Amino acid sequence: MSSTHSTQQPPITIAIPFYRGLDYLSCTIKSVLAQDSASWRLIVCDDRGGSEPVEELLRSYQDSRIQYVLNEKNLGMVGNWNKCLELSGEYVTLLHADDQLEPSYVSTILTAISTHSDAAAWCCRTRIIGAQGEPVFSFPDFW
């Protein structure tokens, strides 16, 4: 992919274990590209869920921070998560292909890392959305 950004290793890897749902993946990637901090890299691990043109989609963004990995064989859900973690840097966010990040996610996490460098994990609030991006109530996520 093209070199439009620095080649220095960014502090946060956003890793997407992908299986199916190219339309959702496109929205997810757009939310990563909309970050107010450029200190990230994106890895999409394709677990061979179908014949969707995932690599073609990723190349269309022409961003050197985006990496596509096609698994040699289907690893299953947990295996693909582990593959994502294996390819990630010190700080990683596992982002599902049907989720979206708020534009300040990376900068917020970077602040948390610098403020609480001795912590092993950081988390943030979530907002549950429907298929069109509208807020929806999710009882399991309420608690």
Image: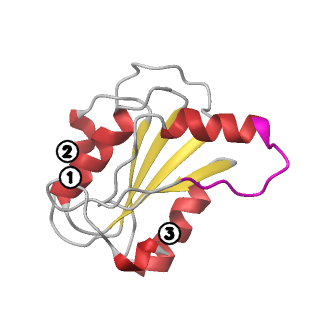
Q: Which residue is drawn at 21% across and 56% down?
A: 24
Tell us which disc is closer to us: 1 or 2.
Answer: 1
- Which residue type carries mark 2? Glu
Tell us which disc is closer to us: 3 or 1.
Answer: 1
Disc 3 to disc 2, C-alpha distance: 22 Å
Q: Is residue 97 magenta?
A: no
* SS at badge 2: helix
Disc 2 crowd rating (10 Å Cα; few below 14, some 14-19, many 20+) is: few
Q: Is residue 80 left or right of residue 33?
A: right
* SS at badge 3: helix
- Which residue type carries mark 3? Trp
Disc 1 crowd rating (10 Å Cα; few below 14, some 14-19, many 20+) is: few
Q: Which colour scheme is used?
A: secondary structure
- Asked whether the beta carbons under mark 3 and mark 2 sit within 8 Å of each other, the answer is no
- Which residue type carries mark 1? Gly
Query: Where 119 falls versus 46 (above or below)?
Result: above
**Based on the displayed image, in which of its 4 quarters is residue 64 positioned?**
top left
x and y, in percent, of residue 107 in the image: 56, 32
The residue wearing badge 1 is 133
**Based on the displayed image, in which of its 4 quarters is residue 8 positioned?**
top right
> Which stretch did the figure color magenta?
115-124
The residue wearing badge 3 is 81
Q: Pick whichever, 68 or 95, lies toward us.
A: 95
Q: Which of marks 3 and 2 is nearer the N terminus?
A: 2
x and y, in percent, of residue 11 in the image: 64, 36
The residue wearing badge 2 is 56
Q: Residue at x 77, y 37 (%)?
A: 115
In the rendered image, which quarter contains the N terminus? Answer: top left
